[in-house]
Amino acid sequence: MMLTGRLIIRTYVGRGAMLWLLTRALISAVIVAANGNPFALSPRSAIIVILVSTLSGLAQSARLREWALLANLGVSRTEAAVYLALPALVAELCVAVANASLA
Amino acid sequence: MTDLLCADCVGKSYRGRRILSSASLRAVAGEVRVLLGRNGAGKSTLLRIAAGWLQPDTGIVRWEGEALTRASLPALASWGLFYLPDHDLLSNAFTLRRQLEMFHKRYGGLSPHDAARRTGVATHLDKRPVALSGGELRRAELAAVLVRRPACLLADEPYRGIAPRDAEVLTSVFHELAASGAAIVITGHEVPSLLEAAHHVTWCVSGTTYELGTPGRATEDERFRREYLGRSLARG
């Protein structure tokens, strides 16, 4: 059911990107403090980053009381989760590819 | 008359408490139906189940006669349903204009500006819902209904906390939608406004429903008068 308006997709993808940036910055800070390379995350850690940013996005949607609005627009929670996860997934792939090519 | 949406023989329990035992709800094209009942009778639960916002323990939801094994609001909304909950339809994350535009871009219908003007919220288009009063918020939600132009509208307590003049706007919009062929079901406790809007009355009591017919016939029903309307309203 990917017929959703661009406005909603843009909003959710943008929010997902912001939350990924925030999650990544926090995790990178912790890794740097432990003298590690913040760009060399294991696949498992990258999945955790994606999950954390997506779940934060879903929690934010609940806090902003968007579910009734989204449902009336024909958007399910699963679809919203996909839009939130997409930028995190793409960004983590880009980071992994860039890190592999530099190594 | 065609049932556009029908919740049949619905049962639902919460934490061991039976809310609905064998309740039914029909949304009929061209009719405004009101669902009346005391607090805790299960009206909102029945409406949520019919809207696919809540899953029943027993019973079935039908859309245009087709039984849905697991009705979901996003799917029903895509087919033409609009569910107006008793609160929090509009999100505080966006301005009213942006949310109306979302409905317009998704479904077409009345333009956001025309809908806002019709419901008297044109001056609030660039505000977020949190900046609106209760009555303004209800009218803003009604603007979303007008933009959507649904085939079926389920509205939970649309008259709650609004001024008599706003109630008139609400009633005229419901009648306008019904005249254009939409099926409308509304709940609430504002009996005079609801009976004025209604073509048909359904009474929800003790987890089940009774079809009372037209408002005139409903007010003649002895048990309904005694157990719900009370003496003052029954006299009026």
Image (cartoon, rainbow, N blue to C red):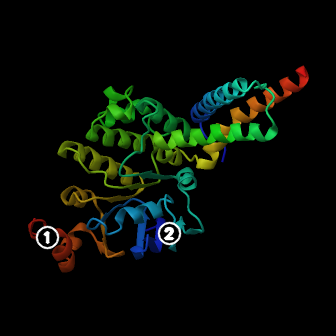
Residue at position x 20%, y 71% from top?
B228
Q: Which chain is disc 2 placed on?
A: B
Q: Nearer the viewer, residue B210 or A98?
A: A98
Secondary element at tag 2 = loop
What percent of the width, then of the height, locates residue A32?
72, 23
Instruction: State left or right for residue B168 relative to residue A6.
Output: left
Q: Nearer the viewer, residue B180 or B232?
A: B232
**Amino acid type of disc 1?**
Gly
Same-chain status of marks 1 and 2: yes
Q: Which of the 4 image quarters holds residue B134?
A: top left
> Do labels 1 and 2 touch, CB within 8 Å?
no
Q: Which of the 4 image quarters holds residue A23?
A: top right
Residue B230, disc: 1
Q: Nearer the viewer, residue B189 or B4?
A: B189
Residue at position x 46%, y 43% from top?
B148
The residue carrying mark 2 is B56
Instruction: State left or right for residue A15 relative to residue A102.
Output: left
* Residue at the extreme top: A102
Q: Nearer the viewer, residue B174 or B225?
A: B225
Q: Nearer the viewer, mark 1 or mark 2?
A: 2
Residue at position x 31%, y 51% from top?
B158
- Label 2, residues with CA under 10 Å away: few <14, some 14-19, many ≥20: many
What percent of the width, then of the height, locates residue A24?
68, 29
**Amino acid type of disc 2?**
Pro
Give how far apart the Cα atoms at labels 1 and 2 are. 31 Å
Please count the marks in the image.
Answer: 2
Secondary element at tag 1 = helix
- The earlier-in-sequence mark between 1 and 2 is 2
